[in-house]
Amino acid sequence: MTKYEGTIILKETGRESTVEELQNLISAEIDTAGGKTGEFNAVGQKDFARVANRKNPDGFYLEVTFEGEPAATNDLKKRLLKIKDVFRVFITCPG
């Protein structure tokens, strides 16, 4: 298994779930993809440098460490983006 770091930006405008509920959903998706969830770090709300959509000028940043198979990361990213309150997902492999 490979270690990964994920940055997940949650929508602030019109968000229906709490951060804790979303952490549980994200953790469940990682487990479903065959990975092991590590620690979550709630960075907090930040304004976007470039606003792509005026309805979402800012977001709540959530960092997570996890282990998983390299082939499953693209599928995991797609599954995380299907969660209604998730705005963006970035997954990196810290060399």
Image (cartoon, helix red, strand yellow):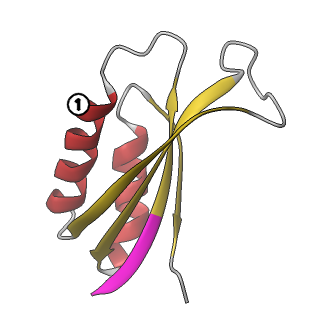
72 relative to 87, above or below: below
Magenta segment, which residues?
Answer: 1-5
Residue 67 is left or right of residue 6, and the answer is left
Q: Quadrant of the N terminus?
A: bottom left
Residue 18 image point, x, y percent: 30, 23
59 relative to 22 in the view: left or right: right
Where residue 42 sits, quadrant-wise, is: top left
Q: Is residue 10 magenta?
A: no
Q: Residue at x 36, y 78 (%)?
A: 71
28 to the left or right of 14: left
Q: Which residue position is annotated with label 1?
A: 21
Secondary structure type for disc 1: helix
On the image, the x and y values in percent for residue 34 come to: 17, 70
Q: Residue at x 37, y 81 (%)?
A: 3
Residue 19 location, quadrant: top left
Q: Is residue 25 above or below residue 36?
A: above
Residue 36 coordinates in the image, percent (x, y): 19, 70
In the picture, the quarter occupied by the C terminus is bottom right
Total labels: the figure holds 1
User: Is residue 39 positioned above or below 1 on the image?
Assistant: above
Residue at the location (75% across, 34% down)? 48
Q: Is residue 3 magenta?
A: yes
Q: Residue type at mark 1?
A: Glu
Give the percent coordinates (x, y) of residue 13: 54, 13
Q: Which residue does the image show at 34% across and 54% down from the upper left?
A: 40
